[in-house]
Amino acid sequence: MQKIIILDFGSQTTQLIGRRIRELNTFCEILPYNKFPKDDPDVIGVILSGSPFSVYDPEAFRIDLDEIRGRYPVLGICYGAQYISHNLGGRVEPAPSREYGRQHLTTIDLSNPLFKGFDEGSQVWMSHGDTITALPDGFHCIASTDSVKYAAFYCPADGSASSNSSDLNSIWGVQFHPEVFHSTQGTLLLKNFVVDICGSRQEWSAASYVETTVAELRQQLGNDQVILGLSGGVDSSVAAVLIHRAIGDRLTCIFVDHGLLRKNEFTQVMDDYKELGLNVIGVDASDKFFADLAGATEPEEKRKIIGRDFIEVFNEQARKIVNGNSSESKCRWLAQGTIYPDRIESLNITGKVIKSHHNVGGLPKEMDLQLCEPLKWLFKDEVRRVGRQLGMPEHLITRHPFPGPGLAVRILGEITPERVRILQEADDIYIRALREYKVRLSGDEARRVLAAGVPAEMSDGEVEVSLYDQIWQAGVILLATTRSVGVMGDERTYEHPVALRAVTSTDAMTADWAHLPYDFLARVSNDIINHVRGVNRVCYDISSKPPATIEWE
Ligand code: XMP
């Protein structure tokens, strides 16, 4: 499959470049700056990302441009452009002040293929400390802003003097960030590069992914058995259905109920899985978890107990499957729903890897299982698309993320079955109300919802979606053991306060509190106080992340 390589020099927006290219139905890989796959015949173009470094920093990331130059079309973005210019004989200097924010391309060479279809004055987003003050020999300036003379450049590989030579193994550089939303024609620029210049056939789609992955899984897994830990979330569920399509009942899934799931979630999820034809072992281990959690109040202590118990229960089941297999059809694989953002080796300014994945880790070595991760190339919205392609029910696909330790991280203080019950009741009312309350969206908001694949009908330029589908994640938090005074039917009450949390986000790294309508909040507050025994007060959490986190513990 054709692919674009994005060499990551540590910019915060490198993942966004990947997202944009995938939206152009083109496969891409984000690799550390020094890991260019020299012998990969499928590479059709290379992008150099931005970076927090200046080209003059002693610890700045450096590559050998000869590995890529003249062999593939190359696009340098921000630091990538400065790096190319600096290394090929141009001049890069500190800008008089950091240039940050919106600017407009006051001159554009519209004959250059990179700017095909651009509008004069197109808005772009700048974020740089250095600036290019002289281009290397043979380079042409193809766009400027009022303050940045070399906002974009081009160097034809054939050395022609023309700024629109047809040799496509050339080099382009842009000082601005086409990948960010505020560069209004940024996607067009990336399309010009990826499709017209690199020659992408735009064949990356959910359907093609399912077809090729199922064939690869059949090849990879042969007659072996596979086990997979289901969490009820979208990633592990889609991975399970995909593997099941490839090898049928040779996949065994394990779903552990730690007693900290949402109300009725265990039975609902088990029913869903049965409907999907999956071979699932459901293990009710809630007594064990509650017994081990008794008396624990400190967040990290609670997490550790849950993590340890989870692995114990999972391993016990896995051992039965692994040991119970005949040698002809042995269980050799542990499947996981790891997705691409879990494993991209993003670089921070010290050059260290900043993300490591935490899934069902730590299976005992003697089980000798290899990892099978069929979603490891996909972003979250692509996983959802694959789920739809596989015919999975919409409520499974659009389910909000839910933390592994479940409601435990939403109960401050001690966890008891009674406190879990109160939280489950309140949470159930809140989540059902979010699903039922519909809002009408238009313009960019509507387009964004449709682009994310949310099945919504468009009429008169508007779409109707539920609040649930509009937000990233929501839940209720049971506040410490503290209670508060209230009054119900002339009687004094002394009961628990709960907080509602709802956030918008794209990746959970940063999040904003969702601006839920007042009439919605009023109704939910009423319903919770009237129906959940033990709750007499409802608050709404209006903190964003950072500085708060999404979960309270
Ligand atoms: P925070 O609270 O760190 O959460 O802003 C970011 C995202 O991660 C989820 N989360 C967890 N998921 N195990 C998980 O599998 C955990 O221990 C855990 N803690 C937080 C959280 O729900 C949010 O989506």
Image: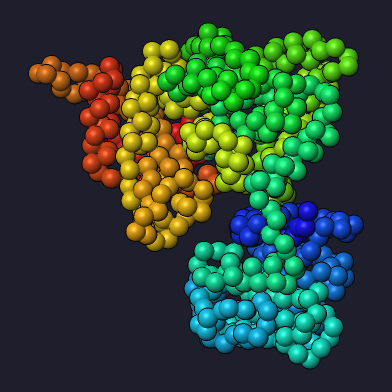
Q: Nearer the viewer, residue 182 or 136?
A: 182
Looking at the image, residue 67 sits to the left or right of residue 104; the answer is right
**What colour-coding does the image apply?**
rainbow
Does the image show residue 362? Answer: no
Query: Residue at horizontal 79%, vertical 64%?
Result: 44
Query: Is 106 located above or below residue 212 in the figure?
Result: below
Residue 444: image quadrant is bottom left
Work out whether 246 lies above or below 327: below
Q: Is residue 62 above or below residue 30?
A: below
Image side of residue 314 versus residue 462, left or right: right
- The reply to whether residue 316 is visible in this rendering is yes
Q: How many marks?
A: 0
Which one is nearer the viewer's eye here, 388 or 487?
A: 388
Residue found 77% across the figure and 57% down from its top: 2
Residue furthest left in the image? 490
| Position of residue 411 measured from the top left corner of the image (x, y, whole percent) | 43, 24
Q: Dividing the image into four quarters, tell me where ligand 1 lies.
A: top right
Q: What is the x, y in percent for residue 75? A: 72, 70
The residue positioned 11% from the left and 18% from the top of the image is 489
Q: Is 283 located above or below residue 189 in the figure? A: above
The residue at 63%/60% (across/down) is 24
Q: Position of residue 104 (x, y in %)?
A: 51, 80
**x and y, in percent, of residue 69 in the image:** 84, 72
